[in-house]
Amino acid sequence: MVATALERLATWRSRGTRASEQTVKHGLTVLEDGGLKKLGDEAWNFLEQLTLASLDIGRLDIADECLEQLTEGFPGSPRVECLKGLRIEADNKPIEAIRFYEAALQEDDTNAALWKRKIAVLRSLGSQNVSQAVEELTIYLDTFYTDVEAWIELADVYAELNLYSLSLQALSHVLILASQNPFYVLRFAETAYTAGDIPLAHKMFLRVIDMDEPEGSKSNATKRAWWGVKLTAGRLLSSPNTPSESKTQPPSSDHLRLLDELATERLAESYRSTSVTPQGQGRDVILAWLGGRKR
Amino acid sequence: MSSAGASLYLDPQIRDWVLFPITLVMILVGILRHYVTILLNSTPKKATRAAIREQRALLRAQILRASAAKSPLPPSYYKAISSSLWNAFTNGTYLKDGPPKEGAEPVSTPANPFSNPDQMDGMMDGMKKQMVMMVPQMVIMGWINFFFQGFVAIKLPFPLTLGFKSMLQRGVETQDMDVRWVSSLSWYFLNFFGLNGVYRLILGNDNAADSSKDVANSSPFAATGQQGAMQAQDYNKLYKAEKDNLELSEGLYTWAAQDVELRVLRRYGKIPAEAANKR
């Protein structure tokens, strides 16, 4: 019983799975059976995992217990400091949490985890603090350039503020850092679409499709990208001289027509097979729309 | 030969009072110095935010350059990042101590490592560790030389050629003795190089007890000197070199999505595939 629980917890830990309720459930069985001693050095990792999970689902009593042990084991460790900050956040005292993080950062201003937590709290505080969050985040990224998640966060903040071109710039860094991930490309394309740069969006949607497996495009990103291709191709065909901020050349109108046709085909096919979407009215609407748009 | 071997008789007392003590003392000293080294290990100095930024600025340019040949970025975005990095390198924005002042004399030689307290700490640390390595070995060797000079400590159970004589009979200058006899000083050297496996068994893989390692870098400055050179890197110069690389990559740049519509259309058979071969 304990062995299986521990095994599962270890895999979640290594993969970073956020199965908080399950984690707490398994964690409690381990604690009750006194498995902590058997774990040896692994016990600390386990306690950290359990603390995070119990904070996640609001079992503050468990979190406090774990934190106590961790503080005893590692007084003054930055990793435990970060957990303590999260504990303050869980009490819904963001101002205090920020103050705590600032004090900890004063000690060591290179601790990325604490810095990111501070930025996250700043952002959560609402619109009047967003500018400060953005400022901190840009300084953070200037130091720790390779943090993809932080770049995405920055793009997200900018998009929230309707600053789409800035969001695109942040996403462009994401693309260099993680160029194999089609979801990021899709996000770039969608942001470009929202920003009104239709030719760029069109190219990027096509790029998502290009990145997928040659046969059997099953990824959801690809389906979304086909939708994007369909919409952008339609826009580009109806108004060929759409301005592009990035001066991207759209494909020739012959190719656009073919692409529009192809996108319609692909989408219709993916919605026609019932295995992909359950039977429903939405499907008929989509097929009708696709059919209506067909030239 | 065999008669000479038989005529030599080794007192069991030598085994109990010379052979075992040498081995035991060496093992114990090894374990001791492992723990002393752990005690002496000072926590590595934390780099400041500015220093990290300085180091990682180069990485940014490298990442950008690595993707240049088939960049996921549209041209305008690539150019924007590339030129902003170029400007930053020109102006020295990422330098730890801020951009260099106008007309200031460029520092050509790396600063004297002794003048920088950070590096001084590192040197002292290395020296301390070296001392822990050297002192016990000197003491043990002195002890063996003083008490057991010229002792024959052990007879190997297998025959060896004459070439091993200087290795196994250090300190016993006899011409005719069988090579199988090992002198006390040689026994010390055998232990010196051979006990690593025992330490690994007792202390685990990553131990500081092995003494033969410091033969390789016997000078206290050898290790720290390299480290000092690493720290004293002139980032301004590296940035200048990186600027050229950035320009070069800008020439190599192509957008991965340049002909993407053709690729997609070809894949689904909308336009003939032969066009692909022609290109």
Image (spheres, helix red, strand yellow):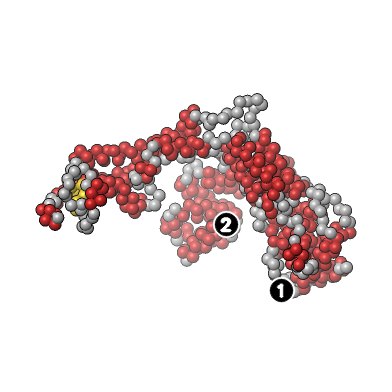
Alpha carbons under labels 2 and 1: distance apart: 31 Å
Q: Chain of mark 2?
A: A
| Residue bearing mark 1 | A275
Q: Residues within 10 Å of mark 2 (few under 14, many from 20)?
A: few
Which quarter shows the C terminus of chain B?
bottom right
Residue B260 position within the rendered picture, expressed as x and y whole percent measured from the top left: 75, 59
Answer with left or right where residue A88 lies relative to residue B260: left
What amino acid type should be assigned to the residue bearing mark 2? Answer: Gly
Q: Residues within 10 Å of mark 1 (few under 14, many from 20)?
A: few
* Residue at horizontal 85 percent and vertical 63 percent from the top: A254
SS for callout 1:
loop
| Residue bearing mark 2 | A16
Would residue B30 be seen by someone viewing this image from the given angle?
A: yes
* Residue at horizontal 63 percent and vertical 48 percent from the top: B63
Q: How many marks?
A: 2
Indicate the quadrant where residue A290 lies. bottom right
> Do callouts 2 and 1 point to residues on the same chain?
yes
Q: Chain of mark 1?
A: A
SS for callout 2:
loop
